[in-house]
Amino acid sequence: MVGSLDLIRSPLGIAQAEAIRLGLSPPRQATFARLLLAIRLRSMPVPVPQLTSYGYLVVWPDEEAMQAFRSRRLHARNAREHLALDLRPVQGFGVWQGTDPLADVRGEPDDGPVLLVTHSRTRPRRMVRFMIADRPVVRGLARQEGQLWAGGFADDILRLDTGTLSLWRSTADAIRFAYAPGVHQEAVKAQREGGWFSESWFGRFAVTRARGNWRGLDDLPASIVDSSG
């Protein structure tokens, strides 16, 4: 099992057309695929869209299927920015669209960069409480040591589904934010006690290769950067 995340910024109109195509026609070989519509991180959990950007997160049975999709079906030639990340699943907890995308995989962390993915479906009657608690978490996420980039997404606005993507220099940096005492752990505790979400999922992936550019991100370790093509 391998994963991929493609972050794409295209001209207005092209971005929407490509996002709709991907959303309506997921790859057959994928075991899990979600179109992630970019929203402003600081607006979360209110989904203020970034209309020219989107992400595509996929879990594949093998690398061959992943590379075939990128070469044949991922049309990013007109993109102003495109960052392609190859991912090795490390662990997942919870449910996203009724399933655990990583199917109880438990891999070994390494010393390289890490991608964290969070997803939640908020109960409408708990939305106000979630919004109040989430604001300091988002502000904290935006200024954490060791964080390379972070963004928000919506994958089903009508169902109040939102989440975050965050790229970290190392597992230690990611764990420090996720589990150290502070606003994040306080919000996690409050959510569990209050039952804000009808479903939620957390995933951690090791980044094994990075190709392209995204939002001025230039701090990825040279060991994973693929500069070919």
Image (cartoon, rainbow, N blue to C red):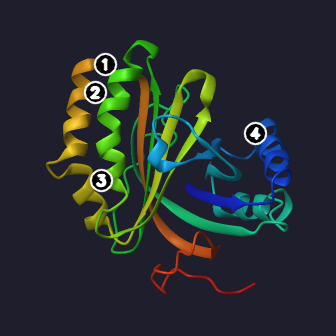
State the image quarter where residue 73 is shown: bottom right
Which kind of residue does numbered mark 1 sit on? Gly
Whether 145 is drawn above or below 119: the answer is: below
Mark 3, Cα crowd under 10 Å, few <14 / some 14-19 / many 20+, is some
Residue 110 location (% of width, % of height): 34, 70
At horizontal 36% and vertical 47% (from top left) the residue drawn is 138
- Residue at x 34%, y 40% (from the top left corner): 135
Q: Of callouts 1 and 3, which one flags the residue occurring earlier in the amino acid sequence? A: 3
- Look at mark 3 in the image and give the residue it sits on: 140
Query: Is the C-beta separation of discs 2 and 1 under 8 Å?
Result: yes
Measure the alpha-carbon separation of dots 4 and 2: 30 Å
Which residue is at the front of the view, 182 or 87? 182
Q: Are marks 3 and 2 in contact (CB under 8 Å)?
A: no
Q: 224 or 105: which is nearer to us?
A: 224
- C-alpha distance separating marks 1 and 3: 23 Å
* Percent x, y of residue 12: 81, 53
Q: Which labelled disc corresponds to residue 23?
A: 4
Percent x, y of residue 225: 56, 82
Q: Check disc 1 and report its element: helix, strand or loop.
A: loop
Instruction: State how far apart marks 2 and 1 are (Cα).
Output: 6 Å
> What kind of element bears circle 4?
helix
Instruction: Kindly state the secondary structure of the residue where label 3 is placed.
Output: helix
The residue type indicated by label 2 comes to: Gln
Q: Which residue is mark 2?
A: 191
Between marks 4 and 2 in the image, the one whose residue lies nearer the viewer:
2
Q: Give the mark nearest the N terminus, 3 or 4.
A: 4
Q: CA distance from mark 1 to mark 4?
A: 29 Å
